[in-house]
């Protein structure tokens, strides 16, 4: 289930194969785990990477085929004349006995079987096989990294939608508060206890709150579209999501997370395997300077009529490269530079991992501080509104002070929501950058929450 801090050590994120294409079913209440499952099953970008990896796997078989014998067969039929063709070297005295040319044609049948087998290539075949294997591993890692990014994006979009739904609730509550304030101001104005300004001020506050509510609702619609896009689906279904201002703390130990990232990050593993593949390609071109040895065999049937006459042949071949316009030299140098570029790419990924984790930890710690601060701010805003309302009711407070207290409370509510979900989003980013599996981490959190109930 994982340790209490939520930092489960993944031994490399497993590659989940997408299911066969089917209709997308989005439940009326969508949980985070269900959203991730939909992403795995239906996201076209992930399916593309899986199919790319499967295509690269077939290249291994193509490379291994060079170790096997190659057999071909052919057959033919010609209807042709049989006139004798004089070739250089035929004695001139022989010309007088040659039959005259004729348009008479004859049937000619032929069939053949040819077998070739490469015996030794001084490393050309084995390097091609190794290169294909490393390239396949690299494409698998790329698919895993794509999956991590997609699941992380889904979690971020899911939390953003939940946040915006809570902000709508907060905006509604603010509208209700200002409606109540307007009713009080109108009642007091009618009995002479409030000025006309108090009524106008209440109406302005209510209008601003209603505008904020419209904006908040639009943000929900936009966030829902973003979540659908993150899941890789097109859906007009209106669904609800889990809304919760509680959160599970995540232990942000830099050294531990960095160690996990360097061990688990698929993009780093992909860069390493790509470097190995490029190194094998370099060795392949080095081996092309050497000869290759093979065997050939053939069996043929041919004649003007049946039964056909057979012949067979067997032999050995050796191919020695001598000069190709410096083609091999340039190919080898190109392969060397490609290997160096792959090493640079690997180092760049390593540097990026260190920077990303360090930045993610800063963001996570800052988000935690914001939660503490905004919770204190919310408590203070509630108390401030209580005092301002009490003073206003007994005639010793002003409408301006009451309005300011209500605005401060509305802002504090929104800031608490944004702080909590900012922490969740920062946690999702850190989980991805540490090379951990977002799906497994979400399951661990859910199990701990159920055990805590």
Image (cartoon, helix red, strand yellow):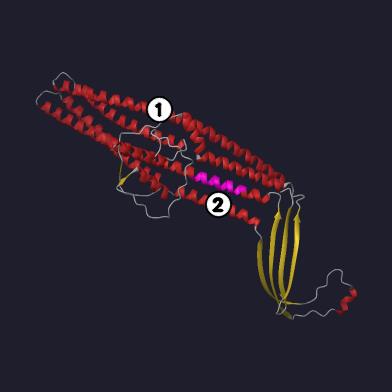
Residue under the image location 55 percent in, 46 percent down: 137
Q: Main secondary structure of the magenta part?
A: helix
Q: Is residue 339 magenta?
A: no
Q: Nearer the viewer, residue 159 or 169?
A: 159
Residue at horizontal 33 percent and vertical 39 percent from the top = 161
Stretch of the chain drawn in magenta: 130-143
* Residue 365: assigned label: 1
Q: Is residue 199 left or right of residue 376?
A: left
Q: What percent of the width, then of the height, locates residue 402?
A: 21, 24
Residue 346: give x, y in percent of width and height: 57, 37
Where residue 75 is drawn, which disc sits there?
none
Where is residue 330 shown, x and y percent of the image? 70, 44
Quadrant hosting residue 103: bottom right
Label ID, residue 57: 2
Q: Is residue 132 magenta?
A: yes
* Observer-nearest of 195 and 387: 387
Most distant residue in the left direction = 191
Q: Residue at x 17, y 27 (%)?
A: 199
User: Judging from the image, what secondary structure is the residue with disc 2 in?
Assistant: helix
How packed mark 1 is, by other alpha carbons closer than 10 Å (few <14, some 14-19, many 20 or more), is: some
- Of labels 1 and 2, earlier in sequence is 2
SS of the residue under disc 1:
helix
Question: Is 301 drawn above or below residue 443 in the view shown?
Answer: below
Q: Residues within 10 Å of mark 2 (few under 14, many from 20)?
A: some
- Give x and y (percent) for residue 57: 55, 52
- Does residue 153 appear to the left or right of 100 in the view shown? left
């Amino acid at each position: 289930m994982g340790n209490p801090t939520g930092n489960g050590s993944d031994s490399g994120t497993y590659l989940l194969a997408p299911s066969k294409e089917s209709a997308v079913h989005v439940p009326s209440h969508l949980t985070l785990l269900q959203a991730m499952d939909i992403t795995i099953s239906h996201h076209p970008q992930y399916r593309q990477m899986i199919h790319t990896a499967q295509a690269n796997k077939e290249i291994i078989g193509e490379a291994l085929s060079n170790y096997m014998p190659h057999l071909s067969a052919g057959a033919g039929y010609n209807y042709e004349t049989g006139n004798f063709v004089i070739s250089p070297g035929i004695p001139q005295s022989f010309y007088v006995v040659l039959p005259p040319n004729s348009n008479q044609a004859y049937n000619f049948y032929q069939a053949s079987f040819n077998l070739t087998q490469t015996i030794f290539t001084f490393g050309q075949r084995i390097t091609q096989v190794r290169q294909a294997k490393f390239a396949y591993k690299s494409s698998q890692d790329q698919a895993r990294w794509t999956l991590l990014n997609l699941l992380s994006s889904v979690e971020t979009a899911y939390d953003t939608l939940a946040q915006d739904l809570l902000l709508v609730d907060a905006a509604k509550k603010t509208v209700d508060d200002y409606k109540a304030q307007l009713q009080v101001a109108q009642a007091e104005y009618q009995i002479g206890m409030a000025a006309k300004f108090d009524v106008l001020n209440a109406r302005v506050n209510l209008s601003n709150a209603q505008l904020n509510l419209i904006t908040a609702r639009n943000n929900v619609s936009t966030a829902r579209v973003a979540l659908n896009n993150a899941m890789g689906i097109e859906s007009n279904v209106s669904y609800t999501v889990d809304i919760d201002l509680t959160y599970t703390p995540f232990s942000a130990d830099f050294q531990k997370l960095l160690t996990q990232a360097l061990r688990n990050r698929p993009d780093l593993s992909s860069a390493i395997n790509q470097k190995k593949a490029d190194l094998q390609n370099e060795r392949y071109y080095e081996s092309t300077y050497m000869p290759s040895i093979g065997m050939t065999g053939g069996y043929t049937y041919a004649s003007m009529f049946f039964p056909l006459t057979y012949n067979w042949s067997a032999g050995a071949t050796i191919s020695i490269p001598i000069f190709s316009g410096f083609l091999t030299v340039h190919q080898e140098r190109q392969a060397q530079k490609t290997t160096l570029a792959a090493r640079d790419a690997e180092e760049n990924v390593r540097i990026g991992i260190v920077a990303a984790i360090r930045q993610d930890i800063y963001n996570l710690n800052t988000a935690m501080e914001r939660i503490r601060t905004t919770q204190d701010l919310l408590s203070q805003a509630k108390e401030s509104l209580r005092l301002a309302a009490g003073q206003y009711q007994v005639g010793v407070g002003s409408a301006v002070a009451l309005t300011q207290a209500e605005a401060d409370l509305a802002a504090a509510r929104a800031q608490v929501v944004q702080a909590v979900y900012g922490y969740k989003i920062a946690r999702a980013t850190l989980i991805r950058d540490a090379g951990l599996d977002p799906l497994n981490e979400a399951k661990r959190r859910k199990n701990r929450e159920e055990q805590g109930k």
